[in-house]
Amino acid sequence: MRIGYFFRVCSGATFSKLSGAINTVHTKSGKNKAGIFFDMVGCFFKYRAGYNDYVLFEYYNMTADQRKTYMTRFKNKRFMLMQNDLTSAEIFNDKRLFDTRFAKYLGRRVLVIEEKITLEQFSEFIKPWDVFIAKPAFGECGKGIEKLVKADFKSDEEFYNYVFDKENEFGVLEEAIKQHPDVSKIYPHSINCLRIATLVVDGKPNILYAVFKTGNNGKFVDNLENGGFACHFDLDTGTVTGPGHTSDMEIAYEHPYSGIKFKGFKIPYCEEVKELVKKAALEEPEFKYCGWDVCISENGPAIIEGNDYAAYDFPQLPDEDTPKVGLISIIKQYIPDLKL
């Protein structure tokens, strides 16, 4: 019965996916496949860790004390529901609403795509800049986002018609941010962001973690789903502290585009970044646990987007020779009696 329940509730669990996860762990650890399977089942019931979490965070290399500090998909959702009022989640899910509500944190001008916008208003908006980012109102992982160059259109009217074509489903048109040259060194084709999670406790904003993300393969977005990398990051020193992780759980010690080593790479304006996200974290009192993508422009930090469902995987990606301490232990510094 417990085994059957394990299969039903693990995310999209099928025998082939589970078998693939077991094979991955067997290859990495050399452990017996049957033993791996029963350990996975045990971790699911004891720690609410699905097989994806088991593989990603390397539960097979942890002690029981280490395992209980790790946030899992199930626990993260439960914690998010404890901290956030999802009846108002559209403020984060709809980019038109988010860009309007958090305009003072964006560091760029934004045009919300509405039928009432005339060609004259559009022409006035695009006049100062040459490059723009068009985004759908809803979406994630960089899907549907386009980089638009004004010179590629024969006229403002052609540009206007493309942006307002309903088939493109654009929700906002944003001035393209000019990234700080120090951040562009590692990979110049994307806006390389810091993903930061904040937790508000008793009216005080706290930073739980920061991760540095960068694009790859000529892509102009930094999402792992598009071939990018994620690295652990120390906001206090402004330094990347580990290698790059891919969505395929591969490790890179230097960026393949620039050859720059990830570990030790420096980002400017980190004190300003901390101040920015702490202020933003207090804007919506119904949301105490949030994630923020923050870029570093030529003029300082700017928020790219906010997420009402803060990522739990980024801060727990396993680095060599670092303590195996999960996100729950960090959260308990602010909520000591937390039970998940």
Image (tube, rainbow, N blue to C red):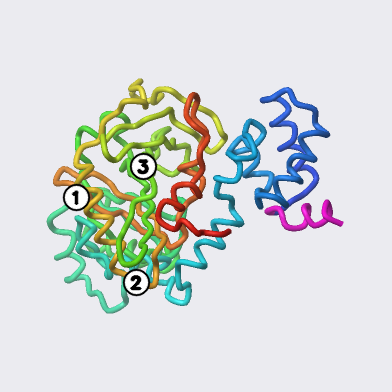
| Lower position in the chain sequence, tag 1 or tag 2 | 1
What secondary structure is marked by label 1?
Answer: loop
Q: Residues within 10 Å of mark 2 (few under 14, many from 20)?
A: few
Where does residue 88 sit, x and y in percent of width and height?
Answer: 42, 75
Q: Quadrant of residue 216?
A: top left
Which residue does the image show at 54% across and 29% down from the upper left? 250
Task: Say whether marks 3 and 2 touch (CB < 8 Å).
Answer: no
The residue sitting at 36% across, 44% down in the picture is 210
Is residue 259 in sight in this rendering?
A: yes
Amino acid of disc 2:
Pro
Q: Which residues are magenta?
A: 1-11
**Residue 183 percent location from the top left of the image:** 25, 35
What is the number of the mark on residue 220?
A: 3
Label 1 vs label 3: CA separation? 16 Å
**Which one is earlier in the sequence, the residue at label 3 or at label 2?**
3
- In the rendered image, residue 126, in percent from the top left (x then y), is placed at 18, 59
From the image, tell me which residue sits under label 1. Answer: 130
Is residue 143 at least partly visible in the picture?
no
Q: Main secondary structure of the magenta part?
A: helix
Going from the N terminus, do you reach mark 1 or mark 3 first?
1
Report the amino acid beneath label 1. Answer: Asp
Label 3 or label 2, whichever lies nearer to me, is: 2
Measuring from the top left, give residue 154's x and y in whole percent.
24, 54
Judging by the rendered image, the residue that carries numbered circle 2 is 285
Q: Which amino acid type corresponds to the residue marked 3 in the rendered image?
A: Phe
Residue 190 in which image quadrant = top left
